[in-house]
């Protein structure tokens, strides 16, 4: 990377952030696209989003990625929101147009792009079950509905949050009880783990009995990407089902941001290679810190 006075800057804000794969992914993308851009990670503690956005304006950063704990604060602070960011009340990508900051949410589009590219799965007309109702789940529910899913059923430990998430899918949204998971899965074409369960060897949102209930043609997707093969995906593979890990969503949500900022098609293959590379350097932090990200 040759930095100069002409180099344009993008960055991510979050806390924790030192484990983030985004600098590797975006710097690989800028290099592959021969763009004189660079990307840094800034550790911004909770409550610091307003100051960070002022800095974006003052220093003329071209774009900003936003991860925990700032996504909802930034949605309040930007000058404009995309329709998805408006509905979700969460922003993970800020685009600067002069002095105006526009907030986007690229998580859902990233997930659907990954479904299409990595699993050859088009959500249109499909019956989908989403496990979890947090920020990532809500983005996935909205994106599946926008992609034409026939049904988006949300199953979550806290039923009130399930109802809020399901409402994002409009008429195709519904909730189902967590104690009848097998019943919900029996008719599913796609099941998505959008809970935070799966980062350690013992945790899975679906027990073996419920997994057996899935049709043989169903796709099992996990948003967790560390480990690459979660206990859920291992069990689904053993059961003979198609599976998809969460790394593709990470790559494609970044690809969407790259295009928002630069106006160019993202070099996805190079971005995926960078995402797959193990974190480097003493600042990368312990492996479990990387797994806690919501970027
Ligand atoms: P949130 O904290 O917003 O939501 C967590 C969800 O998991 C909630 O629905 C919560 O249920 C549920 N949950 C947590 N613990 C349990 C448990 N013990 N039993 C049952 N349910 C549980 O997290 P995010 O939505 O931001 O992230 C969810 C996952 O998605 C994380 O693993 C994250 O790393 C991953 N992710 C991956 C991305 C990618 O690019 N691949 C992008 C964003 C996120 P309740 O509502 O009852 O608390």
Image (tube, helix red, strand yellow):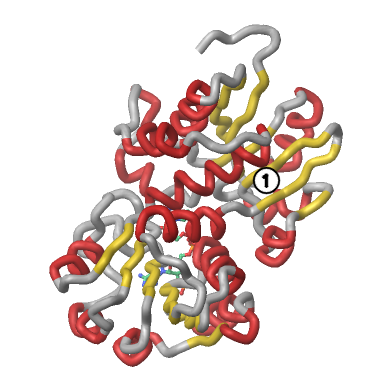
Q: Position of residue 172 (x, y in %)?
A: 57, 84
Q: Quadrant of residue 266?
A: top right
Q: How many marks?
A: 1
Q: Position of residue 154 (x, y in %)?
A: 48, 80
Tell me the quadrant of ligand 1.
bottom left
Against 135, residue 260 (above or below) is above
Which residue is painted at 24% across and 63% down in the image?
233
Give the left or right position of residue 123, taking residue 42 as reference.
Answer: left
Against 201, residue 31 (above or below) is above
Q: Secondary structure at mark 1?
A: loop
Name the residue beneath numbered marker 1. 47
Toward the left, the furthest residue is 238
Which residue is painted at 55% across and 77% down in the image?
161
Give the left or right position of residue 189, taking residue 126 as reference.
Answer: left
Q: Position of residue 272 (x, y in %)?
A: 39, 38
Which residue is painted at 37% across and 88% down in the image?
184
**Cβ(mark 1) to ligand 1 < 8 Å?**
no
Task: Tell me if I can see residue 156 in this picture.
Answer: no
Q: Quadrant of residue 193?
A: bottom left
Structural crowding at the residue carrying mark 1, measured as other residues with C-alpha within 10 Å and reported as few (<14), some (14–19) or many (≥20): few
Q: Position of residue 214 (x, y in %)?
A: 27, 82
Which residue is painted at 56% across and 63% down in the image?
139
Give the left or right position of residue 204, taking residue 271 as reference.
Answer: left
Toward the right, the furthest residue is 99
Task: Tell me if I can see residue 58 in this picture.
Answer: yes
Against 86, residue 95 (above or below) is above
């Amino acid at each position: 990377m040759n930095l100069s006075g002409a180099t344009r800057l993008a960055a991510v804000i979050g806390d924790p952030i030192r484990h983030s794969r985004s600098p590797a992914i975006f710097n690989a993308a800028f290099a592959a696209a021969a763009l004189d851009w660079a990307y840094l990670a800034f550790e911004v503690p909770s409550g610091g989003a307003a100051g960070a956005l002022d800095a974006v304006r003052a220093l003329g950063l071209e774009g900003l990625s936003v991860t925990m704990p700032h996504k909802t604060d930034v949605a309040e602070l930007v000058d404009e929101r995309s329709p998805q960011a408006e509905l979700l009340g969460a922003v993970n990508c800020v685009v600067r147009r002069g002095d105006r900051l526009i907030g986007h949410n690229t998580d859902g589009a990233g997930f659907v792009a990954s479904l299409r590219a990595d699993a050859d799965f088009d959500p249109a007309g499909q019956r989908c079950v989403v496990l979890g109702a947090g920020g990532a789940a809500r983005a996935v529910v909205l994106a599946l509905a926008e992609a034409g899913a026939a049904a988006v059923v949300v199953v979550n430990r806290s039923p009130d949050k399930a109802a809020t998430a399901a409402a994002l899918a409009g008429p195709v949204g519904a909730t189902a009880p967590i104690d009848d998971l097998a019943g919900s899965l029996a008719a599913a074409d796609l099941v998505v783990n959008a809970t935070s369960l799966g980062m350690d060897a013992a945790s899975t949102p679906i027990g073996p009995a419920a997994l057996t209930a899935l049709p043989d043609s169903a796709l099992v997707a996990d948003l967790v990407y560390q480990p690459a093969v979660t206990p859920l995906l291992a069990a689904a593979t053993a059961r003979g089902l198609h599976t998809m890990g969460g790394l593709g969503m990470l790559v494609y949500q970044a690809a969407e941001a790259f295009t928002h900022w630069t106006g160019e098609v993202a070099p996805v293959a190079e971005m995926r290679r960078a995402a797959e590379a193990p974190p480097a350097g003493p600042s990368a932090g312990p492996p479990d810190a990387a797994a806690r990200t919501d970027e």
